[in-house]
Amino acid sequence: MNKFPVLHNTLLLDTLESKKTPRPPVWMMRQAGRYLPEYMELSKKYSFFERVKTPELACEITLQPIDIIGTDAAILFSDILVILECLGIEVQLKPGLGPYIPFPIRSSKDMNKIKIHPAKESLDYVYKALSLTRQELNGRVPLIGFAGGPWTLFCYLVEGQGSKTFSLAKQFIFSDPKSAHHVLQILTNQTIEYFHEQVKAGAQVLQIFESWAAALGPDDFMTHAYPFLKQIVNEDYGVPMILFAKDAEWCYPDFQDEGVKGFGISWGCTPENARFLAGNKTVQGNYDPSKLMSTPDIITKEVTEMIERFGTHRFIANLGHGILPNVPVDNARAFVEAIKNYQSPS
Amino acid sequence: MNKFPVLHNTLLLDTLESKKTPRPPVWMMRQAGRYLPEYMELSKKYSFFERVKTPELACEITLQPIDIIGTDAAILFSDILVILECLGIEVQLKPGLGPYIPFPIRSSKDMNKIKIHPAKESLDYVYKALSLTRQELNGRVPLIGFAGGPWTLFCYLVEGQGSKTFSLAKQFIFSDPKSAHHVLQILTNQTIEYFHEQVKAGAQVLQIFESWAAALGPDDFMTHAYPFLKQIVNEDYGVPMILFAKDAEWCYPDFQDEGVKGFGISWGCTPENARFLAGNKTVQGNYDPSKLMSTPDIITKEVTEMIERFGTHRFIANLGHGILPNVPVDNARAFVEAIKNYQSPS
């Protein structure tokens, strides 16, 4: 086990443990990203996968938003698709298209392309990046590790790229659920191992992104996604887990008694409804990322209203999805500052 | 006023008037479309806008699913963006990209590009296509006219094309709501006139597609979309109106007392929740279009379960979104047949 510096800013961990804090913690999904000029500089010099797979670069990028806009947590710069390497599946990046899998798994006939490699060995660069970042953070804020949810990974694995409808992935799962569940179980096993290794390497919080949850309706989600997510969140990693099932907040009541400490909320869900669906667990969200395109004044006003509606207890201020590339840095900073400066009206 | 043949199949109209029927009516969004080989034949000979703007072609395409798969309603083959012609805005079709607006309205500075033309004159080809189709249907099934919701039209008008995030449209509406609402009011006025003219020309039911409703959160929807939709649905056209606010079923309680007879439901909403949100109005939906990629046997079984969960009263069987281009015609027919053959367990 690594020895790491003592954590000073415990707002995020305290909030996930339902402890009262002086104010909510704040971070932003994709906070290490294209809206930062410092990030764009590195992206000119190194390809996406060079940035992801070089621990020093991933560390530098992960630290950028901590230094520049002052969030209360760091989230490792990485990609949910790197885990497909543990299935022997090659992922490329196509300019303008995003991640691309040259040999996708379209049906049971393709399943022999899957060659399982232990997540412990295949993703060594992730663990090195986590350990290095945890050291470099020097206890300033906690470090979040993450993975994609099995259904979301399955979508990419089948489609080979992003999709509006995920109709190929859905065709597979609806017409041959047995084979599809076999693949989902492999992804689940690898994710559990991956999360354990991330924690050993320094992750202090874990977030699971089931980004395409809403491509399935509620009943199909319970059949094809929930059983696998449940295995992942109920494993004991020794650190708290946040589940983000984007636009599928209707599933959260089914996770209230499972091993989840926090629920990510999209802007399509009101704070009041989020509280209802999350029960007495912590909620994280849900400012509309497009609203960061307005002005610092509007952002400050709206963020204050958001905190008042969610309440300061068991609330992690975040966006409802990733920050957009064209957001001015001053606006991102205004978002963070509005939360840091929040004064309870009482 | 045109004289049209007497309507024989009154299932859809009766259901929208909350009358009891022997079985639910069935139609499918985008039922006149690319999954039909007969449609593909015409699309080889004529461009998309030739098909839309030539009444004889639009009529022929509209009738295809009635003849081939036997739905209980026809919906005019057209496009929600044609109404932008009434604002003097050119819409092109870019292969592989879809509709494309060369001179979009990005901010108040662009608003002088809007030149209002009466919907009555600009869209004559739509009315001619409706009248011709209504005659050709010869009373077999009712004819549905449609338009896009103001917010959805605004999204295209600002972005100039489809978008994952509609961040430009949202930037406009969040940073300059006054100008944005001015544009939305123009779209609203034109849509009301357009619907009146559609009914005069032969439309027997109207559906409004607020396809991008869920890009706005519930509160922003109430501020920026609801006031305009409300004006449209509360106008008396003399025919029933169906509202489809895709993935934003949370807004339906606010429309329960407005001039809406039916609510379109996506597959992200359970039948039970749809009933709760729609009150005592009719619901329409919500089979996952991807499920039409399975087999006729699976489709028949699932459609039967769907009817049982929605109930046969005040229910229009439909998909939760448009039919996908790669659906086998036999599967589409199995969907329709499953509803026609439905026998109540009682």
Image (cartoon, coloured by chain):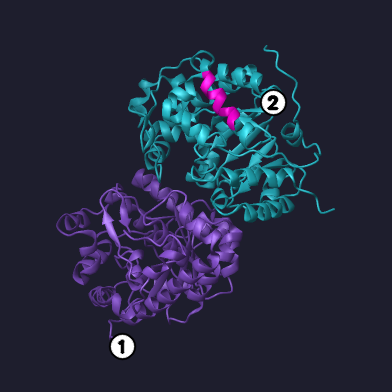
Chain colours: A purple, B cyan
Residue at the image point whose x is 45% and y is 70% from the top: A21
Residue at the image point whose x is 61% and y is 32% from the top: B207
Position in image of residue A263 (x %, y %) = 50, 65
The one of B196 and B29 positioned closer to us in this rendering? B29
- Within 10 Å of disc 2 (Cα), the crowding (few <14, some 14-19, many 20+) is some
Residue at mark 1 to residue at mark 2: CA–CA distance: 72 Å
- Amino acid type, callout 2: Val
- Is B342 within the magenta? no
Disc 1 is attached to a residue of which chain? Answer: A
One can see residue B177 in this view? no
Q: Quick check: B253 above or below A24?
A: above
One can see residue B174 in this view? yes
Task: Report the span colored magenta.
Answer: B55-64
Q: Secondary structure at mark 1?
A: loop
Disc 2 is attached to a residue of which chain? Answer: B
Position in image of residue A274 (x %, y %) = 55, 59
Q: Secondary structure at mark 2?
A: loop
Circle 1 is placed at which residue position?
A: A1
Position in image of residue A318 (x %, y %) = 41, 59
Circle 2 is placed at which residue position?
A: B239
- Amino acid type, callout 1: Met
The quadrant in which residue B238 appears is top right
Q: Quick check: B200 above or below A199?
A: above
Task: Name the main secondary structure of what is drawn in magenta.
Answer: helix
